[in-house]
Image: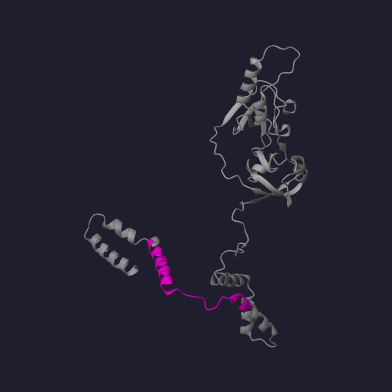
């Protein structure tokens, strides 16, 4: 290929001498140093594919170590043997021989163990999530399926430790630190994940909903305290604010409970606040009730209360 290009350059040079349009540009392109280097690399690769060279041996590193042992065992060494000993001990040469053996043995990736033969066909795919909890909360809530006893991640708080560890709402927790949690109460699971290194074995949710959310900022028109709100799924995950505070809404996935941060904020973890949809439901229900002084107003119908009473526990 280089010879062909050389002949083409010679013909173009003659065209340049004859002052043919564009010949000078083509000549400078074909004679460029980067193109010549590229052709050398191409021919080298082609020669490698054609000859298919094979290594003479695939244990050069081990052979060099054996030579070092043999030279050291000699009673009287020549200057050549001493120089060879010094060369073979060089870290760069040892690394080169090790890389040679890796390529010769085609040891490019770790060998995975074979799949067990008795693995059930319906075995669910699991994932291990390991995180270190110091004093900060995990930033997630869990709930228990009253029928099956299974424990699920009910909600992941934006910016929290669980969010950064790629836990997702809907993931089923199978084990915590090697202990099966099916059938346990959420309070018992919370005790297990109270501190230290935590290893979750989870079955990921098969299809996570995709939400295209726009950035939203609101100003609070009233004070709010999650500890005094009986409707909030998890008071510990709630965020209090006062009238006039500016809130950044970071998650509107839940139609009833948004996740927000107060601005300015020193923490990356958000908190739960009632959504505008929830406030509208509460306001409409309140106005629809007859005036009953000194009576406790029931905020929702039994059906709506069941929908909201998720019984989440913050971990």
Q: Where is 103 relative to 121, above or below?
A: below
Residue 43 belongs to magenta span = yes
Q: Is residue 11 left or right of residue 296?
A: left
- Residue 92 position, x and y percent, is 60, 70
- Residue 168 position, x and y percent, is 63, 42
- Residue 133 position, x and y percent, is 73, 45
User: On the image, which quarter does residue 135 sit in?
Assistant: top right
Where are the magenta residues, as a range? 35-64
User: On the image, which quarter does residue 111 sit in?
Assistant: bottom right
Magenta stretch, main secondary structure, is helix
In the image, 237 versus 245, the foreground residue is 237
Image quarter of the N terminus: bottom left
Q: Is residue 213 left or right of residue 6?
A: right
Q: What color scheme is it?
A: one colour
Q: Where is 86 relative to 169, above or below?
A: below
Residue 50 belongs to magenta span = yes
In this rendering, does residue 263 appear at all? no
Image quarter of the C terminus: top right
In the image, 292 versus 13, the foreground residue is 292
Looking at the image, which residue is at 38% across and 61% down? 35
- Residue 205 position, x and y percent, is 60, 44
User: On the image, which quarter does residue 233 sit in?
Assistant: top right
In this rendering, does residue 52 appear at all? yes
Number of marks in the image?
Answer: 0
| Extreme residue toward the bottom, this view | 76
């Amino acid at each position: 290929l280089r010879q062909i290009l050389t002949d083409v350059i010679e013909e173009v040079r003659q065209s340049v001498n004859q002052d043919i349009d564009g010949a000078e540009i083509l000549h400078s392109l074909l004679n460029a140093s980067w193109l010549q280097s590229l052709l050398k690399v191409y021919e080298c690769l082609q020669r490698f594919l054609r000859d298919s060279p094979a290594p003479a041996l695939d244990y050069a590193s081990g052979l060099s170590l054996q030579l070092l042992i043999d030279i050291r065992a000699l009673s009287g060494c020549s200057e050549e043997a001493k120089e060879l000993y010094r060369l073979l001990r060089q870290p760069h040469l040892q690394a080169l021989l090790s890389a040679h053996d890796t390529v010769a043995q085609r040891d490019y990736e770790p060998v995975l163990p074979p799949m067990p033969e008795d693995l059930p066909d319906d075995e669910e795919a699991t994932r291990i999530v390991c995180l270190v909890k110091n004093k900060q909360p995990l930033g997630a809530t869990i709930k228990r399926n009253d029928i099956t006893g299974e424990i699920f991640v009910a909600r992941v708080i934006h910016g929290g430790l669980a969010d950064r560890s790629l836990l997702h709402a809907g993931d089923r927790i199978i084990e915590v630190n090697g202990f099966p949690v099916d059938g346990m109460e959420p309070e018992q699971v919370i005790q297990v994940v109270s501190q230290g290194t935590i290893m979750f074995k989870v079955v990921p949710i098969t299809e996570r909903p995709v939400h295209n959310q726009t950035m939203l900022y609101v100003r609070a028109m009233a004070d709010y305290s999650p500890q005094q709100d009986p409707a909030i799924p998890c008071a510990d995950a709630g965020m209090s604010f006062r009238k006039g505070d500016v809130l950044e809404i970071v998650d509107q996935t839940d139609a009833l409970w948004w996740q927000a941060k107060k601005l300015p904020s020193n923490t990356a973890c958000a908190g739960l606040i009632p959504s505008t949809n929830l406030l509208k439901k509460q306001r409409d229900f309140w106005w629809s009730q007859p005036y009953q002084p000194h009576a406790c107003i029931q905020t929702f119908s039994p059906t709506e209360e069941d929908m909201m009473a998720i019984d989440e526990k913050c971990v």
